[in-house]
Amino acid sequence: MKVVNLKQAILQAWKERWSDYQWAINMKKFFPKGATWDILNLAEALLEQAMIGPSPNPLILSYLKYAISSQMVSYSSVLTAISKFDDFSRDLCVQALLDIMDMFCDRLSCHGKAEECIGLCRALLSALHWLLRCTAASAERLREGLEAGTPAAGEKQLAMCLLRLEKTLSSTKNRALLHIAKLEEASSWTAIEHSLLKLGETLASLSNPQLRSQAEQCGTLIRSIPTMLAVHSEQLHKTGYPTVHAVVLLEGTMNLTGETQPLVEQLMMVKRMQHIPTPLFVLEIWKACFVGLIESPEGTEELKWTAFTFLKIPQVLVKLKKYCHGDKDFTEDVSCAFEFLLKLTPLLDKADQRCNCDCTKFLLQECSKQGLLSEASVTNLMAKRSADREHAPQLKSGENANIQPNPGLILRAEPTVTNILKTMDADHSKSPEGLLGVLGHMLSGKSLDLLLAAAAATGKLKSFARKFINLNEFTTHGNEELAKAASVRALLFDISFLMLCHVAQTYGSEVILSESSTGAQVPFFETWMQTCMPEEGKILNPDHPCFWPDSTKVESLVALLNNSSEMKLVSVAVCPLQGWRQMKWHEACLSISAAILEILNAWENGVLAFESIQKITDNIKGKVCSLAVCAVAWLVAHVRMLGLDEREKSLQMIRQLAGPLYSENTLQFYNERVVIMSSILEHMCADVLQQTATQIKFPSTGVDTMPYWNLLPPKRPIKEVLTDMFAKVLEKGWVDSRSIHIFDTLLHMGGVYWFCNNLIKELLKETRKEHTQRAVELLYSIFCLDMQQVTLVLLGHILPGLLTDSSKWHSLMDPPGTALAKLAVWCALSSYSSHKGQASSRQKKRHREDIEDYISLFPLDDMQPSKLMRLLSSNEEDANILSSPTDRSMSSSLSASQLHTVNMRDPLNRVLANLFLLISSILGSRTAGPHTQFVQWFMEECVDCLEQGSRGSILQFMPFTTVSELVKVSAMSSPKVVLAITDLSLSLGRQVAAKAIAAL
């Protein structure tokens, strides 16, 4: 008989009662090779014929079972066929279908093309929907049976349905395939959620607790499918987190003016990467703040830390609250963190002793204001701390009793900043005397530093500086005026100039600079600061045109300084006297450098005696301190250019200008202005005095104005200092403010590559697991000094060097290899998440070295052979596997980043793309070794740190082909890992994931 179609072939087999294997042989004769059984819809045709009557046809079912066992039909075609059956009233047919599902539902696989694997995902989703509908129908029948008094039959079928559901869903592989299917077909997933809700309502009325529990378990498994990557276990075995501690210390010590958002993101990144529970995370932030307060040097640094702790950190926690689960939970976590903190009595006692107040009380009040703690929690915690403080060692000396606590002063200074900003907005010409009174009050005692610290911690310092630049600019535009008005204008100019210098030296010149707008005139102070003011790492040219203004003005200024017993303020303010041509104070500041050179030449040539020089320097600093600052700024640049035997007179002149003038006839607020001037001059001269081995005694305020300057021991190689410092930090287990500054200086001196390379060498020397783990946490926090540049060096130079040089592979053994993989991933994730944002002020300040031209190291398109890939191919027997991108097929290096059109001109993107190409090459190569193991650790850490739904993570740079290579590594062959490492937002990503998972 000639068979016309599939249906006829099945009917003939049934009529002639062929056995299953006989049926299979004949079928292959009837249908020659070409079309597959799935294309012919064999599974559907068999089921259709088997389910015609009230009970299934056992012979045709045996053909289907044989087809499944001998893989004539795919699992996806069988599941699709089953899901089309919807007459749930035919018990025997339903049971037969459940039995067929039982054959393979917990061991689904597919070794075909990616499209077939996606087909399996969709079929499984349809089968799950069918199972839920079937379960709901059985539950409904059971409920009806209970009402009619015949529950047995319905209960048996419901139990069978739930058993198959549980069996299907208990497989992680199946849930991973369903996860992909959900992303492929969102509407089908919505239908499943509706079916689940309906089933829940039906089962709620059933009395059988076992069936209800089983159904609830299945519901939980289904609901967990969309979030199966989000589950991370938190570290509950640890109590200290040196990375959080160091990040907070680094920010408080070096970046008070930084915005809170980057700090919040960095802290959240650390929390996610290390899986830190929220209460312990908040506790670590508070611990770092108290340690910073206790160890901060007296003076400005102490005020900075106080502002950071009591003003900035509560703001940071408010933003952290948005990232964490919910308001209520977060307030409970903060309360819990304070409970832990109160147990650290010695730390709190030491902080209270240092600040001369109850620090915890101030902190609790601030947190309460910000809505971080409930009133009840605050009252309870305050009572506990008060009870503890009764037993604390008190300082009861009289002198201490009169000291006002800094936390209280800082919290009062914060609203004052807002008031001063409003005052500064007024028209300066209407009431200059009133404004002068406000500024004079700001100069007294430590008021200025308090206000600046409060402004810096609350993000108002830039606005504060802008107002003073505007005031300074206002004083440069004066017309002829009376003596009193001229003296007020001179004082306003001087005070604003000194304040701005002080701000620039304390908080960095970036705070002063305005956003460059084309066509706008740059204010005088900005121009002077950028071209004439000495700063760390900035070399000035004493012959720069900015130091050489109009010669007639210089001559007039020299004459005035030399002849006048005292400078007349009216003369300088408007100067209607002969030859001055309306010179203003800012013009005097710009002319002083040329005038000083004239005076120096006259002194060196014997035209002027030392007494005349003293008179001239007294004239310079006698009324307006800013003139002395400008004079010393030029002298510092000048001394650097002189030979050893030519410096004496210039240094002597600096010495003369640095000392205060003891005279009755000085202007208002002279002593206060001299204090700021001395601090400014000390900062300016620090480098040049060290280089010339000169000592100048600046008027002492009783406080070290430069506590973190010149920390490196003399006559020791910097590599020794670096290794010793790291060893000490590792032994101690945490980084303190002083060591942060030393590391920063070493990074500045040695450069990023030297710094990073030597610290990685120290890490690879460690052999004890606990030491390497601690070293990673500390190194990550040290690298935060300049994370972007360190990451480029680590991923672009150091790792490729270790992975491609077989003589170095031994250093990648466990534990240092595991630690390095962890560190590399942490750095990569941190830099990638933040590199679109702005660099912090401490990073902008550092002089950038050319690490290497990244365009030549990692070329822009696949037509240029990359240096890295050439390096790889030279190291491998099979050059085809590790050849340059020119020879590699596009598919072997295609990654999600290319489909997302990521900007590959960005150095970090290029480095990441090439590192993943290298990883792909190592996994596909024939040589295994510690470097292969390192790649596994690197990928495991990537998965461990991954955030759910994080499109655009560093794994988007991994070629799609790497996935199939990775699942060959036993530790990585899990469905969750595959889901984690592929970009499921892309259709191609889902296909790659489905293919890899279906083959497991």
Image (cartoon, helix red, strand yellow):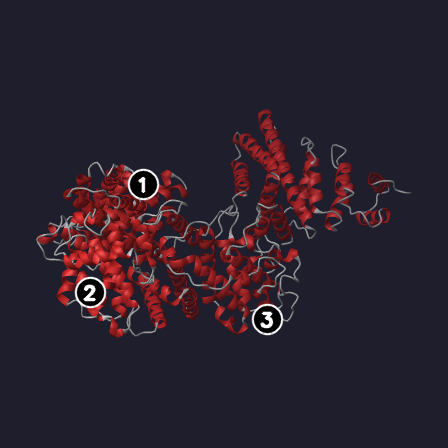
- Residue 452 in the figure: left or right of residue 272: left
- Residue 818 in the figure: left or right of residue 893: left
x, y percent for residue 446: 18, 50
Q: CA distance from mark 3 to mark 2?
A: 64 Å
Comparing 373 with 839, the one in front is 839
- Report the residue that reaches farthest toward the front: 578
Query: Considering the image in quadrants, where does the C terminus appear?
Result: bottom right
Q: Residues within 10 Å of mark 3 (few under 14, many from 20)?
A: some
Secondary structure at badge 3 equals loop
In the picture of the structure, the residue carrying the numbered disc 3 is 875
Determine which of the numbered discs, if any, sits on residue 638 in the image. none
Which residue is pictured at 14% across the width and 49% down the height?
Answer: 669
Q: Residues within 10 Å of mark 2 (few under 14, many from 20)?
A: many
Amino acid residing under circle 3: Asn
Sequence-earlier tag: 3 or 2: 2
x, y percent for residue 458: 30, 44
x, y percent for residue 675: 17, 55
Q: CA distance from mark 3 to mark 1?
A: 57 Å
